Image: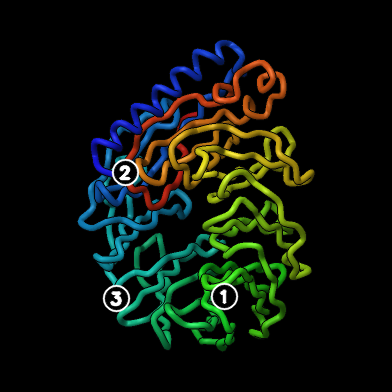
């Protein structure tokens, strides 16, 4: 999509929001303001774009020497990775400036934060290694050499699971002593993986077939092969880790996996081409928010009842979805333009509002632009506010 077409698309979406607000009138529940910053890694701007969530508007951008890929929080600290620059930048979330950087000997593949927030695991290639970084000092505390070019990573406090680029195996690494514990032949090409610490399980989604395999995180034994109706692309756990939701790159179905039983519990339709997911508890209800890029919708499911509770037309091509920590707002980020559609969750869940207003109007509050070609996003609360 060229620049003129993107501008027209943004204008169309903003016109849609104006019409929606006019149609909704006074039917919206009063929304509380959330005082926080939204940080988005924009590939087209080669910057981290900052938006004020208390006013839903872009306020500035933080230029980087290279294109940012991931952005993530470690406590109050914020970090952005630039793979081609082989660098991890710390961003000050209050001054909106680069606070420091760490340069690695190879290209950054991906990164993950240990659950105890004590270290950042950085996967690097050329040469292939797993680096552990202390976020407080921005120093590498350990370097673990890997046998081949890595592609995927997930970590717990004590274990790292790593899948190779172009390979069919899975490697387990102890983060306690830095030793490689072993490799498991999967007989598939991994496309996504997640660790389940309590179940002592590694779940690996194939990129070349409709299948998930489960592996013991303790022994490396392959436990089960779970057939799916689609090739898996995205994993999302519910709050107690008892269910894992799986979406793919095509089709309208979503799978619900029971990790403790290593089985696919159910496959359901979740809007058009379900994609990005996040979970939250609002008014005592455990909810799953799913973006639908093909239809421009945000679908909301009740996790306990496994039923549709709302569908919101946000327009564009929504990709990632984030919830503000107070659960007040759902933010969908357009995969192309970087426009953020803001949905007031309580309004979206209100049956009276749903019945009284047009479907396109009911819960969309506004849409604001951030940065095109968004790669990753994170929310940081504002200090001394709210």
The part of the image, by quadrant, that contains residue 244 is bottom right
Mark closer to the chain start, 2 or 3: 3
The part of the image, by quadrant, that contains residue 242 is bottom right
Task: Count the numbered circles shown.
Answer: 3
Visible in this render: residue 272? Answer: yes
Mark closer to the chain start, 1 or 2: 1
C-alpha separation, residue under disc 1 versus residue under disc 2 = 35 Å
Is disc 1 surrounded by few (<14), some (14 to 19) or many (20+) residues within 10 Å? Answer: many
Is disc 2 surrounded by few (<14), some (14 to 19) or many (20+) residues within 10 Å? Answer: many
Query: Disc 1 on helix, strand or loop?
Result: strand
Query: Disc 2 on helix, strand or loop?
Result: loop
Query: Disc 3 on helix, strand or loop?
Result: loop
Q: Is residue 74 above or below residue 282?
A: below
Assign the N terminus to one quadrant of the image: top left
- Residue shown at the point (71%, 39%) measured from the top left: 308
Place of residue 76 in the rendered image (x, y in percent of width and height, measured from the top left):
44, 48
- Residue shown at the point (58%, 47%) measured from the top left: 278
Place of residue 141 in the rendered image (x, y in percent of width and height, measured from the top left):
40, 74
Q: Is residue 167 above or below residue 342?
A: below
In this figure, which residue is indicated by the disc labeled 1? 159
Task: Give left or right: position of 233 versus 352.
Answer: left
Give the camera-side residue of 92 and 247.
247
In this figure, which residue is indicated by the disc labeled 3? 106
């Amino acid at each position: 999509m060229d620049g003129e077409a993107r501008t027209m698309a943004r204008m169309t979406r903003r016109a849609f929001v104006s019409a929606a607000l006019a149609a909704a009138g006074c039917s919206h529940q009063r929304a509380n303001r959330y005082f926080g910053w939204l940080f988005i890694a924009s590939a087209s701007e080669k910057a981290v774009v900052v938006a004020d969530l208390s006013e839903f508007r872009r306020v500035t951008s933080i230029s980087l020497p290279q294109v940012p890929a991931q952005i993530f929080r470690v406590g109050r600290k914020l970090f952005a990775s630039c793979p081609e620059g082989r660098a991890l930048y710390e961003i000050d979330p209050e001054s909106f400036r680069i606070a420091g950087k760490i340069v690695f000997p190879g290209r950054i593949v991906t990164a993950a934060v240990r659950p105890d927030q004590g270290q950042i695991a950085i996967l690097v290639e050329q040469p292939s290694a797993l680096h552990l970084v202390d976020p407080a000092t921005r120093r590498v505390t350990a370097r673990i050499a890997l046998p081949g070019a890595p592609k995927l990573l997930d970590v717990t406090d004590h274990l790292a699971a790593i899948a190779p680029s172009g390979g069919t195996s899975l490697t387990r690494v102890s983060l306690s002593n830095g030793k490689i514990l072993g490799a498991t032949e999967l007989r598939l090409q991994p496309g996504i993986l997640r660790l389940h610490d309590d179940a002592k399980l590694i779940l690996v989604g194939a990129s070349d077939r409709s299948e998930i395999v489960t592996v013991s995180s303790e022994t490396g034994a392959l436990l089960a092969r779970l057939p799916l109706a689609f090739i898996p692309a995205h994993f999302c756990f519910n709050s107690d880790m008892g269910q894992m939701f799986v979406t793919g790159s095509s089709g309208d179905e979503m799978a619900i996996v029971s990790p403790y039983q290593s089985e696919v519990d159910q496959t359901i339709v979740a809007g058009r081409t379900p994609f990005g997911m996040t979970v939250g508890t609002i008014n005592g209800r455990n909810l799953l928010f799913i973006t639908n890029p093909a239809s421009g919708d945000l679908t909301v499911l009740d996790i306990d009842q496994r039923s549709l509770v709302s569908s919101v037309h946000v327009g564009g091509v929504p990709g990632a979805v984030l919830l503000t920590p107070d659960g007040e707002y759902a933010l969908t980020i357009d995969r192309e333009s970087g426009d953020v559609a803001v949905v007031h969750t309580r309004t979206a869940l209100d049956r009276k509002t749903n019945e009284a207003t047009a479907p396109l109007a009911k819960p969309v509050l506004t849409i604001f632009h951030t940065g095109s070609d968004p790669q990753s996003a994170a929310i940081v609360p504002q200090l001394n506010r709210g």
